[in-house]
Amino acid sequence: MPEAYSWWELILRLASAIVLGAFIGLNRERAHKPAGIKTHLMVSLGSALIMMISIDMFQRYIGLSNNIDPGRIAAQVITGVGFLGAGTIIHAEGGLIKGLTTAASIWTVAGIGLACGSGMYFLAMTATLLVVVTLALVNRFEQAHKKRARLSQKKD
């Protein structure tokens, strides 16, 4: 790794990715979704690690080539995680699609890991907080909507 980073900075980047990924994973696990703490934690950690490697490669080889871009490797993380998320989507009976929110949370956690890996801690923490709050609020809204729909059906 570049000399510009201390070992503590490297550890902080990886540890923040672990904590933030696990926090979102805990939310998904409590909701009994297919991908929980371990999956979200590993996606976030792996994304942070890949971002750190990408930055290191950029710093090591800048000036040797005009084709060096730390964003190129990070972009591949987003694509690869998209395939991982696709694996959580299930076509259930009656044409219902399940697991789309979990796939989206896995994809978002990859972005949070990339932010941690690049040292953008405030951005990563803000995104994590927004994800958890959004999931909680939308879940409450959906539950209230389903309850109203059931009551409306009983009246008919």
Image: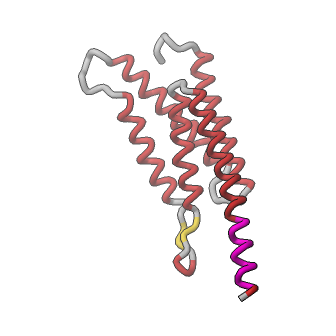
The quadrant of the rendering that contains the C terminus is bottom right
Residue in the foreground of this view, choosing between 40 and 97: 97
Does 16 sit left or right of 155 as displayed? left
**Residue 92 x %, y %:** 56, 75
Compared to 106, does 120 lie above or below? Answer: above
Residue at x 55%, y 37% (from the top left corner): 112
Residue positioned most to the bottom:
156
Does 108 sit left or right of 54 as displayed? right
Residue positioned most to the top:
3
**Residue 33 x %, y %:** 66, 59
Q: Report the number of numbered marks.
A: 0
- Magenta region includes residue 125: no
Does 80 sit left or right of 67 as displayed? right
Residue positioned most to the left:
66
- Magenta region includes residue 152: yes
Compared to 152, does 123 lie above or below? Answer: above
Q: Which residues are magenta?
A: 143-154
Its colouring scheme is secondary structure
Q: State the image quarter where residue 121 is shown.
A: top right
Residue at x 54%, y 55% (from the top left corner): 103
Q: State the image quarter where residue 16 is shown.
A: top right
Residue at x 50%, y 26% (from the top left corner): 118
**Residue 14 x %, y %:** 60, 29
Residue at x 48%, y 10% (from the top left corner): 3
**Residue 37 x %, y %:** 68, 47
Q: Main secondary structure of the magenta part?
A: helix
Compared to 131, does 73 lie above or below? Answer: above
